[in-house]
Amino acid sequence: MYTVMFLQEGGLGSLASMLPFLAIIVVFYFFMIRPQMSRTKKEKAFQAEIKKGAKVVTSSGIHGKIAEINSADNTITIETGAGKIKFESSAISMELSKKYSAPAKK
């Protein structure tokens, strides 16, 4: 009816059994967390250096030129072919904008 479980204390054996889990955590940090933190830092620096008149692409794929920057509510107004659209500044894509504004290679 009742099950009794005894836990055994192992000296060096328990450390050796934890080693694969610790290795997984270290690999996870260096291959996933650290690059993401670096990418986030670059993205914030890019968004801080955006100026009025710069050609950008939003994360949803809308191309346009920055018409107005409002730092009070952290929005950017983009002028497109159809008119002006207001976006959050975090919606500006760094990779696409840099590719869009780069000079064409021949």
Image (spheres, rainbow, N blue to C red):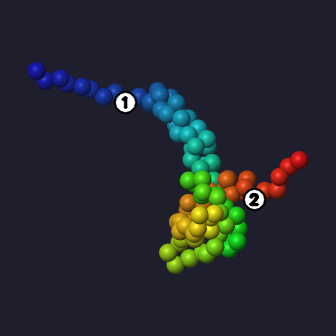
Tally of marks: 2
Front in this rendered view, residue 13 or 104 = 104
Q: What residue type is labelled 1?
A: Glu
Q: Which amino acid does label 2 sit on?
A: Ser
Q: Residue at x 49, y 33 (%)?
A: 21
Give the residue furthest to the left.
1
Q: Which residue is drawn at 58% across and 68% down?
A: 83
Return the residue at label 2: 101
Give the residue furthest to the front.
82
Return the residue at label 1: 9
Front in this rendered view, residue 32 or 50 = 50
Element at label 1? loop
Q: In which quarter of the image is the N terminus?
A: top left
Q: Which tag is nearer the camera, tag 2 or tag 1? A: 2
Q: How far is mark 2 from mark 1, CA to CA?
A: 63 Å
Point out residue 11 in the picture as x, y percentages from the top left corner: 44, 30
Say few, some or many: other residues with alpha carbon within 10 Å of mark 2 (under 14 / 14 to 19 / 20 or more). Answer: few
Give the residue furthest to the bottom.
72
Residue 86 makes an appearance in the image: yes
Point out residue 38 in the picture as x, y percentages from the top left corner: 64, 54
In the visual, does 15 lie left or right of 47? left
Say few, some or many: other residues with alpha carbon within 10 Å of mark 1 (under 14 / 14 to 19 / 20 or more). Answer: few
- Which mark identifies residue 29? none
Point out residue 7 in the picture as x, y percentages from the top left corner: 30, 28
Question: In the rendered structure, are the residues bearing label 2 and label 1 in contact, judged by CB atoms less than 8 Å apart?
Answer: no
